[in-house]
Image (cartoon, rainbow, N blue to C red):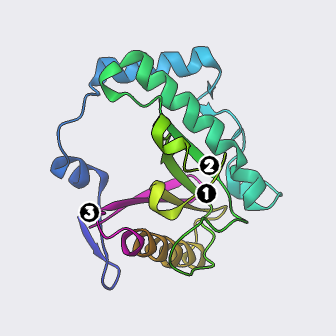
């Protein structure tokens, strides 16, 4: 199903999966990953660790509410790599940095709520300082909101579109970028090429 958001089109997860290359997760793999996540303690009583309450029901600022995402992402990447080695997710890292602007050759003061990075090769480490976030290194950019209402979705839409635009304009060799917006318990995946 296609939803017109002006110049951006939203499609269902099933439609998106139908156009992506074949993936390695079948029902048995998914069950094994879920079991691994329960054994790790990342999934407790059908809720993610750090999210016993829905974000909309929590009083702290969204930066604090979604601070559990990097640890949760690491647990999922570890479980996927352990149960489906072809996924090879162990080198992925998610960093929340809502008050920091990643480094860029182009001027911007935009501060994404988080970015997902592939951990650099040894030769790249010589060029970087520890925990240096650079726009061109972001594989996925993220925006979070505690509530899932029109105003919050609209704010996330503008921020994620800007972040994806900035990533692609910063690196002229970049062919596409992925974004992820979270509003309360809803997740939307964005693709820009």
Choose between 1 and 180: the one closer to the eye: 180
Residue 134 percent across, percent down from the top left: 55, 60
Mark seen at residue 175: 3
Residue indicated by mark 2: 95
> Between tags 3 and 1, which lies in front?
3
Relative image position of residue 87 (x, y in whole percent): 34, 28
- Alpha-carbon span between mark 3 and mark 1: 30 Å
Q: Secondary structure at mark 1?
A: loop
Q: Please determine whether, in this image, residue 82 is positioned above or below residue 65.
A: above
Picture coordinates of residue 40, whole percent (x, y) = 61, 18
CA distance separating discs 3 and 2: 23 Å
Q: Earlier in the sequence, mark 1 or mark 2?
A: 2
Q: Are marks 3 and 2 in contact (CB under 8 Å)?
A: no
Instruction: Look at 47% across and 28% down and name the residue there.
Output: 90
User: Is 146 within the magenta?
Assistant: no
Ranked by sequence position, the earlier of labels 3 and 2 is 2
Instruction: Tell me what residue is drawn at x 70 percent, y 65 percent.
Output: 100
Q: Which mark is residue 184?
A: 1
Quadrant containing the N terminus in the rendered view: bottom left
């Amino acid at each position: 199903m296609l939803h017109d958001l002006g110049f951006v089109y939203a499609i269902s997860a099933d439609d998106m999966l139908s156009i992506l290359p074949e993936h390695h997760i079948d029902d048995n793999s998914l069950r094994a990953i879920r079991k691994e996540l329960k054994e790790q303690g990342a999934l407790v009583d059908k809720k993610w660790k750090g999210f016993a309450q829905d974000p909309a029901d929590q009083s702290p600022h969204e930066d604090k509410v979604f601070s559990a995402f990097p640890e949760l992402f690491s647990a999922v990447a570890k479980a996927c790599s352990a149960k489906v080695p072809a996924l090879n997710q162990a080198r992925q890292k998610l960093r929340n940095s809502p008050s920091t602007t990643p480094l860029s050759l182009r001027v911007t003061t935009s501060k994404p709520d988080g970015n997902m990075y592939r951990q650099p090769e040894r030769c790249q480490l010589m060029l970087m300082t520890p925990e240096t976030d650079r726009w061109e290194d972001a594989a996925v950019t993220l925006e979070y909101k505690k509530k899932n209402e029109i105003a919050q979705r609209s704010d996330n839409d503008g921020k994620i579109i800007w972040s994806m635009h900035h990533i692609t304009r910063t690196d002229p060799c970049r062919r596409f970028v992925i974004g992820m917006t979270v509003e309360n318990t809803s997740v939307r995946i964005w693709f820009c090429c």
